[in-house]
Image (spheres, grey):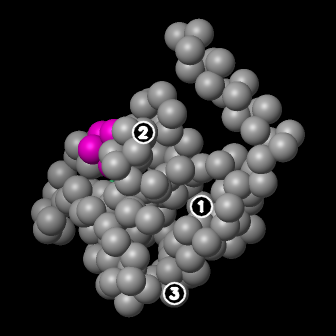
Amino acid sequence: MIIALGADHGGYALKEAVKAHLLRRGIEFIDFGSHSGDRCDYPDMALPVATAVVEGRCERGLLFCGTGIGISIAANKMPGVRAAVCSDSYSAKYTRLHNDANILCLGGRVVGEGLALDLVDLFLDTEFEGGRHADRIAKITNIEQAL
Ligand code: RB5
């Protein structure tokens, strides 16, 4: 599994902590930046991560900004992206089981490092349940195609 990573300045430190965690776990990743903690605009990192996931170059994405919200809004503009902002374990697990979320968004000013790593593990290690949930994802795809 290859993971796409991206963050603005509000999420940069947490992205770096998650990178170290992925390295420890032996999980491959591509870091689309930012590559410093300097101020930048989160849509600029949402775009390459969303593109890599939708094109299949990366299986899942992890995005970080101050709240996780702005970067999730930006990523969700791309058809095929299902980006979920999570700050609790139940949501991180169920957004995989039920929503087949392909990008997890975390707020560097919201969640601490320990919780963030747990959320990342749940997100990466949980498979989509399919079944009735697949029918609902298909309806989301229909909405995208109606635009
Ligand atoms: C940057 O200050 C902050 O607005 C951004 O990281 C994010 O929280 C937006 O949703």
Give the amino acid at mark 3: Gly
Queried whether the magenta region covers residue 124, the answer comes back as no
Identity of the residue drawn at 50% across and 39% down: 81
Mark 2 burial class by Cα count in 10 Å: few <14, some 14-19, many 20+: some
Q: Work out whether residue 63 or residue 39 is closer to the camera in this orientation and state it.
A: 63
Q: Work out whether residue 29 or residue 37 is closer to the camera in this orientation and state it.
A: 29
Q: Is residue 67 visible?
A: no
Compared with 25, 2 (above or below) is: above
Q: How many numbered discs, if any? A: 3
Compared with 76, 27 (above or below) is: below
Magenta residues, as a range? 47-51
Please provide percent x and percent y for residue 94.
74, 59
| Relative horizontal placement of residue 45, taking residue 94 as reference (left or right) | left
| Relative horizontal placement of residue 106, taking residue 40 as reference (left or right) | right
Compared with 129, 125 (above or below) is: below
Please provide percent x and percent y for residue 31.
24, 63
Mark 3 or 2, which is nearer the eye? 2
Q: CA distance from mark 2 to mark 1?
A: 20 Å
Identity of the residue drawn at 61% across and 72% down: 125
Residue 4: name its quadrant: bottom left
Dot 2 or dot 1: first in sequence order is 2
Mark 2 or 1, which is nearer the eye? 2
Mark 3 burial class by Cα count in 10 Å: few <14, some 14-19, many 20+: few
Dot 1 or dot 3: first in sequence order is 1
Q: CA distance from mark 3 to mark 2?
A: 29 Å
The residue beneath circle 2 is: 54
The residue beneath circle 3 is: 114
Residue 92: name its quadrant: bottom right
Identity of the residue drawn at 86% across and 40% down: 132
The residue beneath circle 1 is: 86
